[in-house]
Image (cartoon, helix red, strand yellow):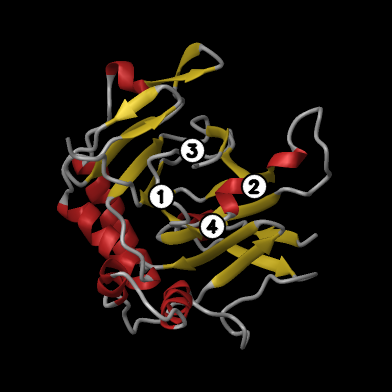
Amino acid sequence: MDKFVIKQSKNPENHKSERCEIKWQMDKEVVDSSDERAESPRKKLKSNRESEETEPLALLAEQELVRDVEYSWKRIRAEGLDCDYTKIFTKSEADDIFLQLEKVLEYFSGDLTKVQVFGKWHNIPRQQVTYGDLGLTYTYSGVTLAPKPWLPVLEKIRDRVTQATGHTFNFVLINRYKDGNDHIGEHRDDEKELEPRSPIASVSFGACRDFIFRHGHSRGKNATRRLEPVKLLLGHGSLLLMNYPTNVHWYHSLPARKKVLAPRVNLTFRKVVAPPKN
């Protein structure tokens, strides 16, 4: 099993500037972009498509979105887990975007701030809102969400993600964590509205927080296997691309961290299938 070591600067000023690093002890197939075998998500997407004899027009159109911009990618691999991590915004860009998000986002209120777990309704320990293309809906934990129209700052982030990965997205779920008390429990993003095999792009701004993957067979008292969790630090202006089949086998969470005092805004860009027209 791959072992992951998280290193974070003890200097508070360095922490504020999100100079948090992820270092890997490589037992198997965890490589970075300097490895000859490493391939960025957009290059991998392009090579996969070029190897096919025929392609739908939609895929050909999306392939044209691939850009010649290089990023330093970290590949995160374990059994059934396939993720790619990089910084897609400079610190000054990320600072500016974070301030814009704090100013313009309008989070849900009322019943849309609750989720259903084992038949009971609970207030979510964070703020939440969705934006996206007109006519889409997204249902999870007993709540159906209709996205608000795209904002310019969200389009800027979405376009940068597409530039880096070659994938397009029509929906974003945004979570705001006011401090380390706000959190999200273990879950999988496997809702039926999501396009099969499409990745989920998680972009983070603000406080650097722990992000933990746990294999589905290693959860709870009745776990059938002993697979170590994969722990990451998601930095300011970073992108974590969760590729198929990660959400089939692994749960992820952002646990509470009492010592974190600053807010964090996370945007998970998704490809949602439009409902059929009557």
Marks 1 and 2, how far apart in space?
29 Å
- Residue count near mark 2 (Cα–Cα under 10 Å), binned few <14, some 14–19, many ≥20: some
- For disc 2, the marked residue is 249
Residue 61 placed where, x, y %? 25, 72
Tell me the number on the disc at residue 244. 4
Residue 210 placed where, x, y %? 59, 47
- For disc 3, the marked residue is 261
Tell me the number on the disc at residue 206. 1
167 left or right of 262 in image: left
Helix, strand or loop status at disc 3? loop
Helix, strand or loop status at disc 2? helix
Res 65 quadrant in image: bottom left
- Mark before the other along the chain sequence, 3 or 1: 1
- Mark before the other along the chain sequence, 1 or 2: 1
Marks 2 and 4, how far apart in space?
10 Å
Mark in front: 2 vs 3: 2
Observer-nearest residue: 70 or 264? Answer: 70
Residue at image position (53%, 40%) is 260
Mark in front: 3 vs 1: 1
Q: Amino acid at mark 4?
A: Tyr
- Do tag 2 and tag 4 residues touch (Cβ < 8 Å)? no
Q: Amino acid at mark 1?
A: Gly
